[in-house]
Image (cartoon, helix red, strand yellow):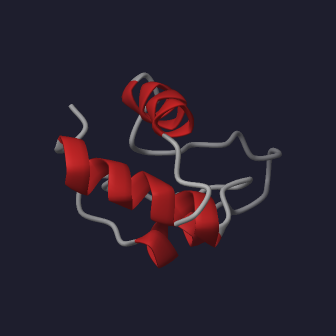
């Protein structure tokens, strides 16, 4: 990772540390909604990128690399 920087990973870790693991979005009345739960401590980069809007594969790989370097998110 040529653009792998500790400050960017620290910011990503802080955002993830203070966010919930499960994502819930309000649905319009009378509609069906699927809720997806993601365990950030065991998910691979592909699963993270697929589950979180705005997080691409590159950022998801950085999140996994940070988790492997520092340890699980609590």
| Residue drawn at x 59%, y 57% as measured from the top left | 59
The outermost residue toward the front is: 2
**Residue 71 shows up from this direction:** yes
Q: Is residue 38 visible?
A: no
Q: How many numbered markers are drawn?
A: 0
Q: Nearer the viewer, residue 49 or 5?
A: 5
- For residue 16, side relative to residue 41 (left or right): right
* Residue 73 shown left or right of residue 18 in the figure: left
User: Which residue sits at x=52%, y=30%?
Assistant: 7
Q: Nearer the viewer, residue 39 or 17?
A: 17
- The correct choice, above or below, for 53 with respect to 58 in the image is above
Quick check: 19 above or below 48?
Answer: above
Q: If the image is split into quadrants, where does the C terminus sit?
A: top left
Q: Quadrant of residue 29?
A: top right
Residue 52 in the image: state x and y as whole percent: 61, 56
Residue displayed at 37% across by 28% down:
17
Residue 32 on image: x %, y %: 70, 63
């Amino acid at each position: 990772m040529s653009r792998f920087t500790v400050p960017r990973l620290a910011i990503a870790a802080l955002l993830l540390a203070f966010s919930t693991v499960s994502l819930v979005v309000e649905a319009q009345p009378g509609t069906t909604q699927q809720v997806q739960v993601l365990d950030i401590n065991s998910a691979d980069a592909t699963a993270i990128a697929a589950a979180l809007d705005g997080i691409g594969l590159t950022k998801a790989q950085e999140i996994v690399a940070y988790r492997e370097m520092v340890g699980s998110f609590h």
